[in-house]
């Protein structure tokens, strides 16, 4: 005779697994709701952090008013805000995490073993994170729907991302090719901040072209041409898209 212990244990095990599955689904639903609530504040935080990094921290580090560690802290905060904004897409979040890891390893290795590989690893990680973030934001900015403050914030971040992306490329070229740019101050004069190249990137993107810094290396010239084209085409394309979306939203409202 059997006492029915095995069936009872099987039923108990099945119940525990079902309870675990229900708990996991409940936590997942809470996580998705938190992601929805945090996306717009995360984008606002991203806009503030990136603006502070580009227009306050980097110039002040360059003139010695702030320690160089402030740039690293701001890049860390920028990485966290990027994760919050991209977390809704699991693939994008994984790529951003991977890029942060690659960049951190590259920076850490470059301190003790400076080489072309570590320089490329650090720059590649940052470029990958900015590219993924830009794709996620571009889908929100140019996608269908009503024109909102959230969309406008995304457009501003996307525009600054272009300048930051090319700035990192210019830094990489300057580190790998001597005299790739004419008119740059000595690295020691900027405390390693690269503020002059950031200034060059924004002046190229906005087509201000003051001419005090000039790309000499052929690849640097081609990148500057590409950035200036993006700087002219993006605002016009964005404005046309926003006007189209607003007209479509008002027409839909009248039909309803």
Image: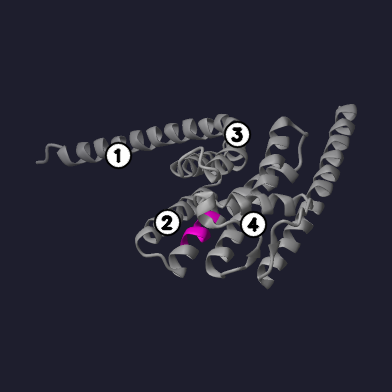
Inter-mark Cα distance, 1 to 3: 50 Å
Q: Residues within 10 Å of mark 3 (few under 14, many from 20)?
A: few
Residue that mark 3 sits on: 48
Residue depth check, mark 1 versus mark 3: number of the one nearer the observer: 3
Residue that mark 2 sits on: 107
Inter-mark Cα distance, 4 to 1: 56 Å
The numbered disc on residue 166 is 4
Q: Is residue 68 above or below residue 39?
A: below
Q: Is residue 179 magenta?
A: no
In the picture, measured across the screen, residue 110 lies left or right of residue 8, that is: right
In the picture, measured across the screen, residue 12 lies left or right of residue 55, that is: left
Contact (Cβ within 8 Å) of mark 4 with mark 1? no
Magenta residues? 121-126
In the picture, measured across the screen, residue 252 lies left or right of residue 3, that is: right
Counting residues from the N terminus, which is met first, the one under dot 4 or under dot 3? 3
User: Please, what secondary structure does the residue beneath circle 3 have?
Assistant: helix
Counting residues from the N terminus, which is met first, the one under dot 1 or under dot 3? 1
Q: Residues within 10 Å of mark 2 (few under 14, many from 20)?
A: many
Residue depth check, mark 2 versus mark 1: number of the one nearer the observer: 2
The numbered disc on residue 129 is none
Inter-mark Cα distance, 2 to 3: 25 Å
Residue that mark 1 sits on: 14
Contact (Cβ within 8 Å) of mark 4 with mark 3? no
Inter-mark Cα distance, 2 to 1: 49 Å
């Amino acid at each position: 005779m059997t006492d029915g212990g095995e069936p009872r244990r099987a039923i108990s095990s099945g119940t525990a697994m079902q309870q675990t599955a229900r708990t996991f689904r409940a936590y997942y639903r809470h996580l998705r709701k938190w992601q929805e609530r945090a996306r717009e504040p995360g984008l606002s935080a991203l806009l503030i952090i990136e603006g502070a990094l580009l227009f306050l921290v980097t110039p002040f580090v360059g003139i010695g008013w702030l320690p160089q560690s402030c740039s690293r802290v701001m890049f860390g905060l920028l990485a966290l805000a990027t994760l919050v904004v991209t977390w809704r897409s699991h693939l994008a979040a994984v790529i951003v995490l991977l890029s942060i890891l690659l960049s951190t390893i590259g920076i850490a290795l470059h301190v003790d073993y400076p080489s072309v590989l570590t320089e490329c690893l650090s720059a590649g990680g940052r470029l990958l994170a900015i590219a993924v973030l830009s794709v996620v934001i571009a889908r929100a900015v140019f996608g269908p729907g009503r024109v909102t403050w959230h969309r406008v914030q995304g457009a501003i971040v996307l525009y600054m991302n272009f300048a930051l992306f090319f700035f990192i490329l210019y830094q990489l070229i300057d580190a790998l090719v001597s005299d790739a740019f004419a008119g740059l101050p000595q690295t020691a004069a900027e405390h390693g901040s690269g503020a002059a190249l950031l200034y060059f990137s924004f002046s190229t993107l906005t087509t201000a072209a003051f001419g005090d810094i000039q790309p000499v290396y052929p690849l640097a010239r081609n990148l500057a041409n590409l950035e200036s084209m993006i700087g002219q085409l993006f605002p016009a394309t964005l404005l046309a898209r926003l006007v189209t979306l607003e007209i479509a939203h008002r027409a839909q409202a009248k039909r309803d």
